[in-house]
Image (tube, rainbow, N blue to C red):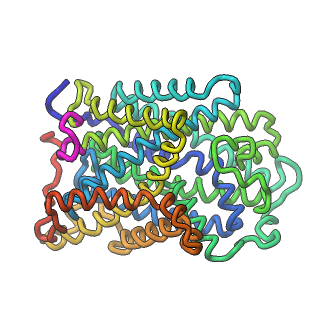
């Protein structure tokens, strides 16, 4: 075990693109996208996904500007610490680590559900433990093995979406699966917009969860071979691919399945037989559609767990370096793997998974408490970028010094900030209307947990908002790492 804490810069542009794509294309697209159409109609679902897609674009460019200037592991937690307030960085880091460590356990449970489709009589925990061992080994070998595994798993998802779009469009115009439907379902009953603006806003929440994981690209900055070139390139590729995949997929589903169909109500991996993707493939005449989509969803879940393991390990490693977590988590082995951070994350993931078997109430509590953590991370990115750019100008720098700079500042981070807050509030608006305090506490649990972390650090270390002229803008020199 090395005493220094140097990770290896082994990730290439193709890895970065697929890591971010893999992080955001999963059960949210393959299964839950149908529920968005069912709720708000085809037009409402498209509007919500487009709105969230634009917000994610601005978040990605904000993150890209900071990550090319300061390509370090820990990413937005470190940016919040350096550009806003050390207390915000502390809370952001632990919030993000906790979020992904819990998500890892959720993915392990989901993997068992997916495999039950083929092996209904085998106990689920056997599959979950096998998945955990595989993911641990991928992450323990080297950062390159993580990148390669993620690349190929994400590629399977990408190919599936492309085939789905081709099959779907051929079905819409009547070449496959019988008569042409064209845009019939867009004017069916109350379509295209069902329930007006309130329902579109409620689908913003579904869309927001679907896009979570795109910020993983920032976590990889510290292990990217040539961050100044790779990060901007990956960000541009990723945004357009995600937006096209989501918008076109929802368009195809909305054309082929009327929004009133009960088959659109599935939202989890156990609903694979009524996944919109499965139904469209079946309609086109693919008899084994359910098995094929189940295999793709299994790949999706393993990919999400792999990304979750990587993201939470690197965040715990960064917290160790900054002194916000025990120093042992900052140590790396000869292959550049923060092995104690990896073991710590695996242990928490395993405990959470065991809670799903033996203490279901604890498990439900943990899952609920990490529910909005991803949106809190997004808010942190928007605030950090707003402060970074203002400090950059206030200290006499010129935008031409930045290797990559986000367009439409300050509109981008401010829009992202407002939309994230709207989505978080809209998560369960009915519970506020009915004064259902139990539902409110379950849904919004992430927020008090985050605030406790923030104020604990703030009161302990008496930190304050860093004045713009005192913000540390020392650039990161890769050559001297």
Above or below 391: residue 442:
above
Q: Is residue 334 left or right of residue 345?
A: left
- Image quadrant holding the C terminus, namely top left
Residue 127 versus residue 31: which sits nearer the camera? Answer: 127
User: Which segment did they paint magenta?
Assistant: 319-329
Above or below 72: residue 306:
above
Residue 134 versus residue 86: which sits nearer the camera? Answer: 86
Query: Residue 20 in the image: x percent, y percent?
Result: 44, 47
- Which residue corresponds to the image point at 85% horizontal and 57% vertical from the top-left? 180
Answer whether residue 283 is magenta in the image.
no
Residue 237 versus residue 111: which sits nearer the camera? Answer: 111
- Which residue corresponds to the image point at 15% horizontal and 64% vertical from the top-left? 471
- Which residue corresponds to the image point at 23% horizontal and 43% vertical from the top-left? 325
- Which residue corresponds to the image point at 39% horizontal and 60% vertical from the top-left? 376
Q: Is residue 305 left or right of residue 194?
A: left
Query: Residue 390 in the image: x percent, y percent?
Result: 22, 72
Task: In the displayed orientation, state which residue is furthest to the right.
Answer: 179
Above or below 276: residue 116:
above
């Amino acid at each position: 075990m090395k005493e220094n804490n140097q990770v290896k810069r082994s990730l290439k542009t193709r890895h970065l693109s697929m890591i971010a794509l893999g992080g955001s294309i999963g059960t949210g697209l393959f299964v839950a996208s149908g529920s968005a159409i069912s709720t708000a109609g085809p037009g409402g679902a498209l509007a919500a996904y487009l709105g969230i897609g634009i917000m994610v674009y601005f978040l990605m460019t904000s993150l890209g500007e900071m990550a090319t200037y300061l390509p370090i592991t820990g990413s937005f937690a470190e940016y919040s610490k350096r550009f806003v307030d050390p207390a915000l960085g502390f809370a952001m880091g632990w919030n993000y680590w906790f979020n992904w460590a819990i998500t890892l356990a959720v993915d392990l449970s989901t993997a068992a559900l997916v495999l039950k489709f083929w092996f209904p009589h085998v106990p689920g925990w056997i599959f979950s433990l096998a998945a955990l061992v595989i993911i641990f080994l991928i992450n323990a070998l080297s950062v390159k093995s993580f990148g390669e595994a993620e690349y190929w798993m994400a590629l399977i998802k990408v190919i599936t979406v492309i085939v789905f779009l081709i099959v779907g469009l051929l079905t819409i115009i009547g070449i496959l699966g019988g008569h042409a439907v064209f845009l019939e379902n867009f004017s069916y009953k109350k379509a295209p917009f069902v329930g007006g603006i309130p329902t579109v806003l409620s689908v913003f929440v579904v869309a927001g969860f679907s896009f979570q994981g795109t910020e993983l690209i920032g976590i990889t900055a510290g292990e990217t071979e040539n961050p100044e070139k790779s990060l901007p390139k990956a960000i541009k590729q990723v945004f357009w691919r995600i937006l096209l995949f989501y918008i076109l997929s929802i368009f195809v589903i909305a054309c082929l399945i009327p929004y009133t169909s009960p088959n659109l109500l599935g939202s989890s991996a156990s609903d694979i037989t009524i996944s919109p993707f499965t139904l469209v493939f079946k309609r086109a005449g693919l008899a084994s559609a359910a098995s094929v989509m189940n295999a793709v969803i299994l790949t999706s879940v393993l990919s999400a767990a792999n990304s979750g393991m990587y993201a939470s390990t690197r965040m715990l490693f960064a917290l160790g370096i900054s002194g916000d977590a025990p120093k042992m988590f900052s140590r790396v082995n000869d292959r550049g793997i923060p092995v104690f951070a990896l073991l710590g994350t695996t242990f928490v993931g395993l405990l959470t998974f065991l809670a799903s078997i033996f203490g279901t109430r604890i498990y439900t509590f943990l899952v609920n408490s990490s529910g909005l953590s991803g949106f809190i991370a997004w808010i942190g990115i928007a605030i950090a970028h707003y402060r970074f750019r203002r400090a950059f100008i206030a200290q006499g720098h010129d935008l031409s010094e930045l290797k990559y700079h986000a367009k439409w500042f300050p509109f981008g981070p401010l829009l992202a900030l407002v939309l994230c807050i709207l989505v978080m509030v809209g998560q369960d608006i009915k519970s506020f209307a009915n004064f259902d305090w139990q539902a409110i506490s379950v849904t919004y649990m992430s927020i008090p947990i985050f605030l406790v972390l923030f104020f604990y650090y703030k009161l302990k270390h008496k930190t304050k908002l860093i004045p713009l002229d005192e913000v540390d803008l020392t650039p990161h020199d890769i050559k001297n790492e």
